[in-house]
Image: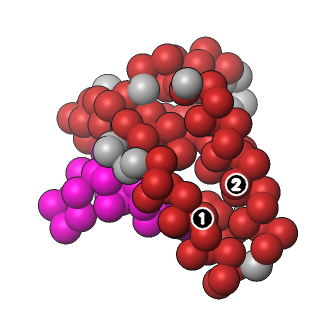
Amino acid sequence: MDQQYEEGLKTRQRVMGEPFVERAFAAATDFTRPLQDYITREAWGTVWQRDGLDLKTRSIVTVSMLVAMGRAHELKGHVRGALNNGVTVAELQEILLHATVYCGVPVAAEAFRAAQEVLEQAA
């Protein structure tokens, strides 16, 4: 493992939580392991390391983009990450309501369901 990968792994664990990251790697197969390594090195080891935005803001941006793309599965993980990065439940609710106007009700409704599932698990 190189320095970029190591830094990415630390940030990924900090944001997403160690259990989440452990499950992601444990579920990886020989076929999907390169994707986990790529995400860790290239996303978490580069973009998430930059100084331009703090981790909370990066989480808000990421949640917003996943809502817009209708990616509920990935959204769940990043809702957890956003909460870990200091996004409050009230702020999360506002992000999703704001997305309703720009992304549409069906996409936002799915995002609310996904976020609610995470909030129930966290309670």
The residue sitting at 71% across, 46% down in the picture is: 114
Q: Between disc 1 and disc 2, whose residue precedes?
A: 1
Q: In the rendering, which numbered label is found on residue 96?
A: 1
Judge whether residue 32 is colored magenta: no
Q: Give the extent of the magenta segment.
A: 45-65
Say what amino acid the circle numbered 1 marks: Leu
- Front position in the image: 31 or 94: 94
Provide the major secondary structure of the magenta segment.
Answer: helix
Instruction: Give the residue at x 19% y 67%.
Output: 52
Residue at 49% in and 25% down: 21
Amino acid identity at mark 2: Phe
Is residue 60 on the magenta stretch?
yes
- Residue 92 position, x and y percent, is 50, 56
Q: Is mark 2 on a helix, strand or loop?
A: helix
Residue 44, position as x, y percentages in the image: 37, 45
Q: The N terminus appears in which quarter of the rendering? A: top left
Distance between the alpha carbons at the discs numbered 1 and 2: 7 Å
- Name, please, the residue furthest toward the right: 106
Identify the residue at horizontal 55%, vertical 35% (top origin).
Answer: 36
Q: How packed is label 1: few (under 14 Cα within 10 Å), some, or many (20 or more)?
A: many
In the image, residue 50 sits, relative to residue 33, either above or below, namely: below
98 vs 45, left or right, is: right
Residue 112 numbered mark, or none? 2
Against 112, is 53 above or below? Answer: below
Does the image show residue 31? yes
Judging depth in this view, the residue of 42 and 112 nearest the camera is: 112
CB atoms of marks 1 and 2 within 8 Å: yes
Residue ranking furthest to the bottom: 102
